[in-house]
Image (cartoon, rainbow, N blue to C red):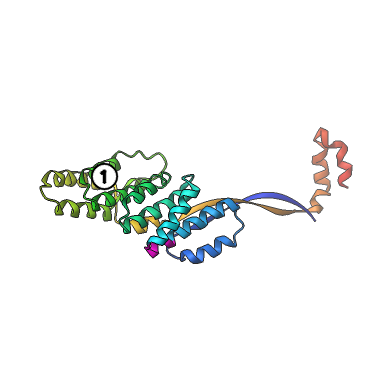
């Protein structure tokens, strides 16, 4: 039986809520995807598990992984975003900033929401409001409108921070105006930051696959007649008999 090789493209997905990160690690380990891709997928799942543990030790491990891989694609950026969110839980604000700088390939809805909530919790109201303004200025070049929005969780955190601050009348007016605009232009989402972090990532992979060739057809008169119409194949026609 003759065979011919062809390339088949398949999609691998990670994160989501249907399968736990630990189980996904096993699936990735047993998959046939490239080693480099497998490594960054594994890293992303580990940072997701570390995010769930909320410990300083887990945060340190995630930071090491993220700094080692850098900011090269959406997968590594999601790892950095998970780590930024882990740092936010522990109020490690410098780490939040460092990790967000390594998450430039993440959809802005993730990084903007983390940044706004982080600034709000630090009572940096002016900076948080400026970040909220940026949400309205994003251009939809790569991601859809929903990816250029902000989580209600971040908005609620900022609103509460403004209410808790003294002499914050001007900040509240500015916030209410921006809140109306992000609502009007569909730039807000009810998804929490955690929900956004677990949004599935789809990775396409190409695999060689063999396909059998019908030898009967190759030796048929119809195929031989076809070959004879090709000048440089005429001398080869008899070899197929």
Magenta region: 49-55
Residue appearing at x 47%, y 63% in the figure:
21
Q: Is residue 60 left or right of residue 193?
A: right
Q: Which quadrant of the figure contains the N terminus?
A: bottom right
Q: Is residue 51 shown in magenta?
A: yes
Q: Is residue 52 shown in magenta?
A: yes
Residue appearing at x 24%, y 51% in the figure:
122
The one of 1 and 10 positioned closer to us in this rendering: 10
The one of 30 and 136 positioned closer to us in this rendering: 30
Which residue carries the number 1 mark?
Answer: 132
In x, y percent, where is residue 44? Answer: 47, 56
Q: Is residue 192 visible?
A: no
Q: Is residue 157 left or right of residue 241?
A: left
Q: Is residue 99 left or right of residue 116?
A: right
In x, y percent, where is residue 106? Answer: 41, 47
In x, y percent, where is residue 84? Answer: 37, 53
Residue appearing at x 77%, y 53% in the figure:
214
Q: Exactly how many numbered labels are in the figure?
A: 1
Q: Give the class, few, some or many, for how many residues have Cα within 10 Å of label 1's Cα (few <14, many ≥20).
A: many
For the stretch drawn in magenta, the main secondary structure is helix
Q: Is residue 195 left or right of residue 174?
A: right
The one of 59 and 49 positioned closer to us in this rendering: 59
Helix, strand or loop for disc 1? helix
In x, y percent, where is residue 185? Answer: 27, 44
Q: Is residue 196 visible?
A: yes
* For residue 169, above or below residue 235: below
């Amino acid at each position: 039986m003759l065979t011919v090789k062809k390339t088949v493209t398949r999609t691998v997905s990670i994160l989501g809520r249907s399968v736990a990160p630990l189980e996904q690690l096993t699936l990735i380990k047993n998959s046939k995807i490239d080693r480099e891709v497998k490594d960054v997928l594994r890293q992303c799942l580990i940072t997701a598990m570390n995010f769930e543990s909320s410990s300083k030790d887990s945060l340190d491990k995630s930071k090491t992984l993220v700094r080692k891989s850098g900011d090269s694609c959406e997968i590594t950026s999601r790892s950095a975003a998970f780590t930024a969110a882990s740092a936010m839980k522990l109020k490690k604000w410098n780490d939040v900033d460092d990790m967000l700088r390594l998450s430039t390939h993440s959809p802005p809805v993730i990084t903007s929401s983390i940044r706004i909530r982080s600034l709000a919790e630090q009572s940096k109201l002016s900076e948080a409001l400026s970040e909220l303004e940026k949400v309205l200025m994003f251009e939809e070049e790569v991601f859809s409108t929903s990816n250029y929005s902000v989580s209600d969780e971040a908005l609620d955190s900022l609103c509460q921070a403004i209410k808790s601050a003294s002499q914050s009348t001007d900040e509240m007016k500015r916030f209410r105006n921006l809140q109306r605009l992000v609502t009007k232009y569909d730039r807000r989402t009810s998804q929490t930051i955690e929900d956004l972090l677990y949004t599935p990532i789809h990775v396409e992979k190409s695999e060689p696959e063999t396909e059998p060739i019908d030898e009967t057809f190759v030796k048929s008169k119809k195929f031989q007649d076809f070959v004879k119409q090709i000048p440089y194949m005429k001398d080869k026609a008899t070899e197929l008999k």
